[in-house]
Amino acid sequence: MESITQILRDLVGHHNSLAGLGVLAGSAAIEYLFPPFPGDFVTVLGAVLVTGYGWSFFAVLGAVMLGSLVGAFGAYEVGVVWARRRAAAGRPHGPALAAVIERFHRHGSAFVIVNRFLPGIRAFIFVAAGLAGTRRRAVLFYAAVSALAWNLALMAVGAAVGSRLDRLRELVEQYTMIVWIVLAVVAAAMATRWYARRRRDRARTDDPGPE
């Protein structure tokens, strides 16, 4: 994160420069292809450029929106290509992957619309959408709604905190940690439920019943 902070500090002198906006857009896009990349922190720093250095709010928001949609589309296409290759090879989906695809058939729009609020796994949501064959138009629409809500929230945080970069980073890291804890609890609950169901099914199979 320190290197990213330094890059944006170097770009501060280039008022509303294409280079600076390109860094913001690229950061938002790369996060979908390389999830550990701290794209959210860069978006918050974009708010600092607006409030502290006079950059255009709409230019910064447009840059991070463009990057978010490009990254989401790229991750979606990974899923589409993956699905095509599996189909061409005649390989059926495993039980876990089939379950994910089934959930996307039923609740795909809900997953996509909350993707931006789930750092770390948002890229996998779009890969799963591509695997499930979710319509591109619908994916991009819900991705845009999610990205707009999330980016506005991040920029509001950045505007409220101001140029205190350490505090900005701390807030983003705290939110990310909380989300990971919640996701871990949900995953553990689902795994426990799956294991209990499997044990019940196995017990029914082993039980010969009344003779």
Image (tube, rainbow, N blue to C red):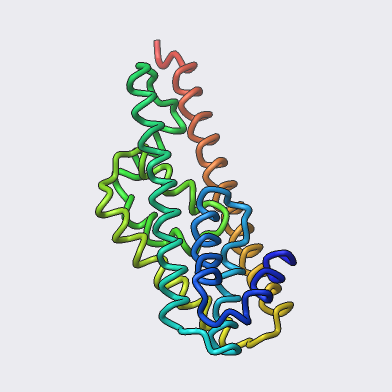
Quarter where residue 6 is shown: bottom right
- For this rendering, which residue is in front, 55 or 140? 55
Please, is residue 100 above or below residue 123 in the view?
Answer: above
The quadrant of the picture occupied by the N terminus is bottom right
| Identity of the residue drawn at 39% across and 66% down | 146
Q: Position of residue 137 (x, y in %)?
A: 25, 53
**As drawn, is 27 to the left or to the right of 140?**
right
**As drawn, is 90 to the left or to the right of 150?**
left
| Identity of the residue drawn at 49% across and 50% down | 123
Q: Position of residue 12 (x, y in %)?
A: 62, 80
The quadrant of the picture occupied by the C terminus is top left
**As drawn, is 125 to the left or to the right of 46?**
left
Please, is residue 209 above or below residue 78 in the view?
Answer: above
- For this rendering, which residue is in front, 155 or 209? 155
| Identity of the residue drawn at 74% across and 67% down | 2
Please, is residue 161 above or below residue 45 in the view?
Answer: below
